[in-house]
Amino acid sequence: MSIRFLVIDGFNLIRRIYEARIHKEKPQGESSNVSAEDMKQVIEATKSSLARALNAHQPTHAAVVMEHHDKTWRHLLYPEYKANRSETPPMLLSKLPEFATAFAELGVQSFGIDSYEADDVIATLATVVAANNGGVVILSTDKIYLQLVNDKVIVYDHFANKRCDRTYIKEKYGIVQEQYIDYLALVGANSNNIKGVQGIGPKSAVIMLSEHASLDLILSAQPASTMLKKVSAGSSNALRSRQLVTLKTDVELGQNLKSFRL
């Protein structure tokens, strides 16, 4: 039987439900007053949400990949990485072991790798499963994972009930999946505070990628147009941004796929 692996971006799932439950249900100014009972409800809601995902996707294997909140290689390369994000509420951080316990009650293991973001661990896990001829659904609203999409890997927005595959990328961004990393290198990834090339927006990026196919070919082209001149002037920024948005697929997981079987 072939593997059907559901990979859950754990903190993405938890934070989305936390924000919905706490910030949207409490009156303005009271969202910082989070009680133990509030957190109990968030944990139960998150567990229920994961149970819904398991029922919907019917995986043979599953894992919740959790974020480690220390600095990573991306911060060393670019100290401003994610500097635009608000601090994680201490109460939420303190309850992460209880979320893991709730997930375990559904038969799903939670894990993370020291010094690596969940993004890189998820990318590695998806790559390993696909290499073993398995299918992968990455449960996340984070579009950084679109770079992993292929015939065996899709991203699924659990909250919008949207399947994000090659067709989605083409319709949403006007590019083919293989161009997605270069697209981000040009326009940036605002959620991670990664700057693109100054003066280049989505429309310009799509035009250049349709004409030149890749960032490398754009940079090697004669800078005759205003757009190409902007990219040429911001080439170092584009190359650094490409490095930052590219997910690692060679993280040492320390476990084999059998350990994630449901």
Image (cartoon, grey):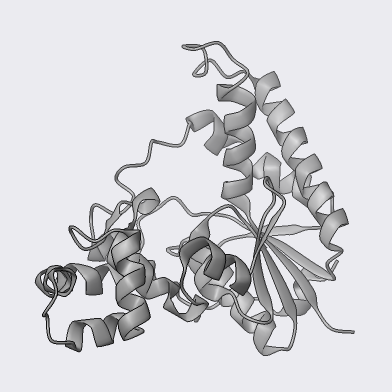
Residue drawn at the location 71% of the way across and 35% of the way down: 43
Please indicate, yes or no, whether residue 254 appears anywhere in the rendered image.
no
Left or right relative to 203: residue 45: right
Left or right relative to 32: residue 72: left
Residue drawn at the location 37% of the way across and 79% of the way down: 210
Q: Quadrant of residue 126?
A: bottom right
Residue drawn at the location 42% of the way across and 77% of the way down: 179
Say which quadrant the C terminus sits in.
Answer: bottom right
Q: Quadrant of residue 75?
A: bottom left
Q: Nearest the camera: 120 or 168? A: 168
Say which quadrant the N terminus sits in.
Answer: bottom right
x then y, percent, for residue 6: 74, 65
Please indicate, yes or no, whether residue 71 appears anywhere in the rendered image.
yes
Left or right relative to 9: residue 143: left
Using the image, determine if residue 116 lies above or below residue 149.
above
The number of numbered discs placed on residues in the rendered structure image is 0
Q: Nearest the camera: 241 or 175? A: 175
Q: Nearest the camera: 259 or 213? A: 213
x then y, percent, for residue 245: 38, 67
x then y, percent, for residue 127: 60, 81
Residue drawn at the location 26% of the way across and 85% of the way down: 216
Q: Quadrant of residue 111?
A: bottom right
Using the image, determine if residue 120 lies above or below residue 128.
above
Using the image, determine if residue 35 lies above or below residue 170.
above
x then y, percent, for residue 225: 14, 74
